[in-house]
Image (cartoon, rainbow, N blue to C red):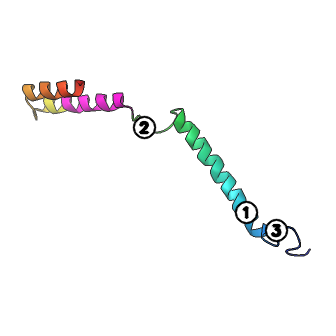
Amino acid sequence: MMWGSNQWGGFGMVLGPIFMILIVVGIVAAIIYLLRLFGATGPATSSHAAHDRALVLLKERYAKGEIDSTEFAERKKLLAD
């Protein structure tokens, strides 16, 4: 066995594992990208879900008595727009 007698000049021992790690990281990144693209992971960030959450919080504040009926109606109208 002779070290450095191939076309890599001895860098195959160093570059080989680095390339293997880069390939694995690339595959994992591609899988994560595809899952997020098709909506399989992550919280719901759509505007519809945000609107529903805001309306629920508004109703909770109204039920607790933190806001009165006129303020509730105004804010509900703003959310509808």
Describe the element under mark 3 as helix, strand or loop: loop
Task: Give the alpha-carbon distance from disc 3 to disc 2, as whole Å.
Answer: 47 Å
Q: Amino acid at mark 1?
A: Pro
- Which residue is outermost to the right? 1
Q: x and y percent of residue 41 in the render?
A: 50, 37
Badge nearest the viewer, 1 or 3:
3
Instruction: Please state the extent of the stretch shown in magenta in the rendering.
Output: 46-59
Task: Give the alpha-carbon distance from disc 2 to disc 1, as whole Å.
Answer: 35 Å
Give 36 or 7, whichever is nearer the viewer.
7
| Up-down relation of residue 74 to residue 13 (above or below) | above
For the point 76% across and 63% down, which residue is it? 16
Q: Amino acid at mark 3?
A: Trp
Q: Amino acid at mark 2?
A: Pro
Q: Sequence order check: which comes first, mark 3 or mark 2?
A: 3
From the image, which quarter does the C terminus lie in? top left
User: Which dot marks residue 8?
Assistant: 3
Q: Which residue is mark 1?
A: 17
Query: Answer yes or no: do the residues labelled 2 and 1 have beta carbons within 8 Å?
Result: no
Determine crowd level at label 1: few under 14, some 14-19, many 20+ residues with C-alpha closer than 10 A: few
The secondary structure that most of the magenta stretch takes on is helix
